[in-house]
Image: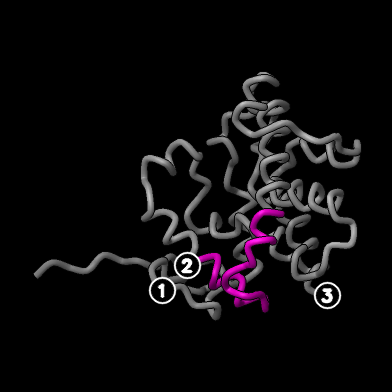
Amino acid sequence: MAKEPRVWQRMLSGRRLNLLDPSPLDVELDDIAHGLARVARWNGQTVGGHIFSVAQHSLLVEAIASHIDPDMSREWRLAVLLHDAPEYVIGDIISPFKAVIGDAYKTIEAGLLGAIHLHFGLPAQPAAVLKRFIKQADRQAAFLEATHLAGFGREEAIKIFGRPEPLPRTVLTLLEPWPVAAAEERYHEKVTAALAK
């Protein structure tokens, strides 16, 4: 009789998060911040002495979203900060590989995001308008990362990610990759601050 495969990951908090049936009770901010600070964007194919982490990317997306909508609600801010949170478990898979994998990845990712949202008091499924808003900020972040860190030319990046809008210098300073510990701490602080509002 074949042994069933293990479908959970043990976290440093001691939680066991089931990938196929994730529970909001097994989600911890400490685990998310720790994991996202150690997951590299662009498969690590970026310039600089440190990886550009998913934690730092999430803060860049939040800064862009705040520029687009300075009066963003607490719920929207949290959703923006958590938009890639499932990657603390499943890693950051580049878009071309996601296209190859297909629906299995999307199903796992959606289930994890739903559990994460519920843990933080958000609806499991964000409204369509919020999804579009996050996608807008995320694509701008991807353009900036592509051209500043990942070796893309401007015209190539425009074809893939769309034409960017002008952003203040304060946003652009977030493109300098941070050490892992700094990315973890800053992400944790930003989510904690959003929760406290």
Query: Label 1 sits on what residue type?
Result: Asp
Q: Residue at x 37, y 40 (%)?
A: 100
Is residue 129 within the magenta segment? yes
Residue sitting nearer the eye, 159 or 16: 159
Magenta stretch prevailing secondary structure: helix
Dot 1: within a 10 Å radius of its alpha carbon, few (fewer than 14), some, or many (20 or more) residues? few
Kindly identify which residue carries mark 2: 111
Image quarter of the C terminus? bottom right
Residue 146 circle label: none
Residue sitting nearer the eye, 11 or 167: 167
Residue 21 circle label: 1
Figure quadrant of residue 25: bottom right
Kindly identify which residue carries mark 3: 196
Magenta part of the chain = 111-133
Q: How many marks?
A: 3
> Residue 88: percent from the left, percent from the top?
55, 57
Query: Label 3 sits on what residue type?
Result: Ala
Dot 2: within a 10 Å radius of its alpha carbon, few (fewer than 14), some, or many (20 or more) residues? some
Mark-to-mark CA distance, 3 and 1: 28 Å
Please tell me whether mark 2 sits on a helix, a strand or a loop. helix
Residue projecting furthest to the left: 1
Q: Earlier in the sequence, mark 1 or mark 2?
A: 1
> Residue 58: percent from the left, percent from the top?
70, 51
Mark-to-mark CA distance, 1 and 2: 7 Å
> Residue 69: percent from the left, percent from the top?
85, 55
